Image (cartoon, rainbow, N blue to C red):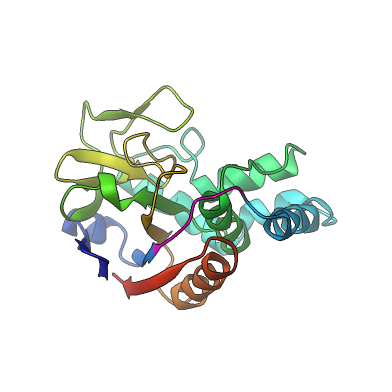
């Protein structure tokens, strides 16, 4: 996939495919403007959160098929999903507990909205700081990185993304090294589905529409791995 002069190849490690036969990735690259979220996007985030919080049994969303598939994927790779949750489940739990959704910038907020709607983890990376090709693999013993707004994350057995410099993102929490800031102009977003590729096109198109509307998204390229 290409964006401007960037060329990034995304692949899935064979060891992950062997343990998680249905794993698939939906990859979207785009030029963006990472400005503050407009009021309309903030309203969409609030509405989505209110719909979940207003369900007769809000916690039932934690048993949805995508969430359960992510948990099974973590278990298959050797990571306890009760201690290390997929990012979509973490967002849902935040909403259910009444804490609402974080507001960072238009690009990050769009990704959080799509993750909340799809129940799928989504990695988001500033391509200016991604070095070489990206592989989706399990973390190795001793691997760590500083998660965004977190202490060093123990990456062993965690489903993660690594480039030529090592791990930079995961289905739980991305790293500070490749995080999107106000200076970001090119992004790579990767939707992680442990339950198959059937819905990935739908959610990639939803993401593209929202990035176009709220983050001046353009020059899109998409692929499913």
Where's the C terminus, which quadrant?
A: bottom left
Q: Is residue 9 above or below residue 142?
A: below
Q: Residue at x 34, y 43 (%)?
A: 169
Please state the horizontal and vertical placement of residue 139, each as a whole percent of the image. Answer: 25, 39
Observer-nearest of 7 and 11: 7
Q: Is residue 78 above or below residue 34?
A: above
Report which quarter residue 191 is drawn in: bottom left
Chief secondary structure of the magenta span?
A: loop
Residue 139 is left or right of residue 182, and the answer is left
Residue 52 is left or right of residue 163, and the answer is right
Observer-nearest of 205 and 62: 205
Is 73 one of the magenta-colored residues?
no
Q: Residue at x 31, y 29 (%)?
A: 145
Please state the horizontal and vertical placement of residue 32, each as a whole percent of the image. Answer: 44, 60
Q: Residue at x 53, y 60 (%)?
A: 215
Please state the horizontal and vertical placement of residue 113, each as a whole percent of the image. Answer: 61, 57
Where's the N terminus, which quadrant?
A: bottom left
Provide the residue span drawn in magenta: 31-36
Observer-nearest of 83 and 24: 24
Please state the horizontal and vertical placement of residue 30, each as a whole percent of the image. Answer: 38, 65
């Amino acid at each position: 996939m290409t964006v401007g002069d960037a060329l990034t190849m995304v692949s899935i490690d064979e060891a992950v495919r062997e343990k998680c036969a249905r794993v698939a990735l939906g990859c979207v690259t785009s030029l963006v403007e990472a400005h503050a979220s407009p009021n309309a996007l903030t309203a969409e985030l609030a509405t989505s959160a209110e719909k979940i919080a207003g369900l007769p049994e809000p916690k039932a969303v934690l048993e949805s098929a995508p969430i359960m598939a992510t948990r099974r994927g973590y278990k298959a790779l050797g990571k306890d999903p009760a201690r290390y949750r997929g990012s979509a489940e973490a967002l849902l739990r935040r909403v259910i507990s009444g804490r609402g959704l974080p507001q960072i910038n238009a690009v990050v907020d769009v990704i959080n909205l799509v993750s909340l709607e799809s129940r799928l983890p989504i990695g988001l990376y500033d391509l200016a700081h991604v070095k070489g090709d990206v592989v989706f693999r399990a973390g190795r013993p001793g691997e760590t990185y500083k998660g965004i707004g977190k202490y060093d994350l123990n990456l062993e057995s965690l489903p993660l993304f690594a480039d030529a410099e090592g791990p930079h993102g995961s289905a739980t929490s991305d790293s500070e090294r490749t995080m999107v800031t106000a200076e970001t102009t090119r992004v790579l977003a990767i939707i992680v589905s442990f339950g198959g590729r059937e819905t990935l096109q739908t959610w990639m198109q939803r993401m593209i529409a929202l990035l176009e509307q709220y983050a001046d998204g353009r020059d899109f390229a998409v692929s499913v791995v």
